[in-house]
Image (tube, grey):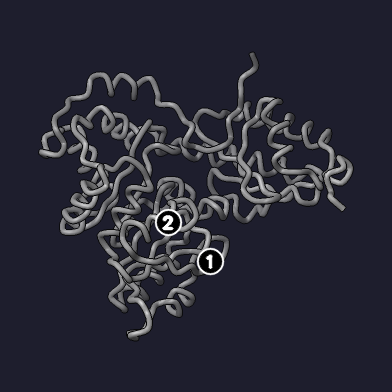
Amino acid sequence: MAKRIDLRSDTVTTPTDEMRQAMANAEVGDDVYGEDPTVNHLEALAAEMLGKESALFVTSGTQGNQVAIATLAGRGEEVIAEAESHIFFYEAAAVAAIAGAQIRQVKGARGVLQPADVQAAIRKLDVHQPRTAAISLENTHNRAGGTVTPLAVLQEIAQVAHAHQVAVHMDGARLFNAAVASGHSVKEICAHVDTVQFCLSKGLAAPVGSLLAGSNAFIAQARQWRKRLGGGLRQVGVLAAPGILALTKMVDRLADDHANARLLAEHLVEMRGVAVDMETVETNIIIADIADSGVDVEAFLADLGQAGVLATAFGPTQVRFVTHKDVSREDILAAVDIIAQVMQSAQPIEEAGLSGG
């Protein structure tokens, strides 16, 4: 059976053999009692790398974001976020359900919030309006195609927010991709935010988990919110052990994923009926628009899957491809041939008799 090339997401990465061995041999204890030495090591390592006082292991990026927002924002308050941010689009209205707050959507430029727009969105003190409690930045931005927030923009937004006593949270699910692509360390990036969440289980290839970092006082409150959400874990060292390897051995290789994404995007834009905004291809995500081909997205993805390449629908005419450690340069070139063949043989909707006219 031919190899299936899975470009749906970097969440499909499998742990390395070294990670599996580390899980088997991890020293463990009860983390609710603070007695798991492996997760304690992971949290200390993450805090040091990000330049924060403390860090907290959480089960997922969504849990990390929601613990952060619940700690920063209360009932009837507001969180500013980019219009198509993950916390708005993919977290099941958890900001409303858990924190009792609402999200104020602000459209960014290719997913990057602009300081002037953030300034305009911060609420004035008014009995008719909610208090702006926090600003959430997504870096890299998933739905924009893995775009990176420039350090200068991040710094200016932080200055605006802090002048109004508003906290800045970063949804850094792919924070290390942003660091590798920009040439800035994660410590430099995180210096401008109060709290940050990043995933171990995407490009860094650990099987489970994310980390939330901030001040000692913030993490103490966040730990209680994690407990409320059922995230108080016991012998979690078996999950923390691959996380340590993710941070110490899997960061530099993210550049390979970025190169592979660029290679794929360069081939996609040469195909009939396929458009890619190459300005957004900064990291490991490519958003391809097949509107001009006239081909139905779901039919295209079904045919693509049958041919051995998996991708994800990202709108009525858009397809997302994500590169990761389990996809090599050779896999990308093979995927290019398959995508081209499927696109060439696909019937436009009108020709297939599906126009409904």
Q: Quadrant of residue 169?
A: bottom left
Q: What x and y, as percent, mark residue 357?
A: 87, 53
Q: For numbered disc 2, what is the local secondary structure?
A: loop
**Could you say which is closer to the camera, residue 67 or residue 56?**
67
Query: Could you classify mark 2 by the number of other residues whose Cα lies within 10 Å: few (under 14), some (14-19), or many (20 or more)?
Result: some
Q: For numbered disc 1, what is the local secondary structure?
A: loop
Compared with 72, 27 (above or below) is above
Q: Which residue is mark 2?
A: 93
Q: Is residue 192 visible?
A: no
The reply to whether callout 1 and callout 2 are in contact (CB within 8 Å) is no
345 lies left or right of 281: right
The mark found on residue 66 in the picture is: none
**Could you say which is closer to the camera, residue 235 or residue 27?**
235
Q: Is residue 235 visible?
A: yes
Numbered-mark total: 2
Q: Amino acid at mark 2?
A: Ala
Quarter holding the N terminus is top right
Q: Which residue is mark 1?
A: 108
Q: Amino acid at mark 1?
A: Gly
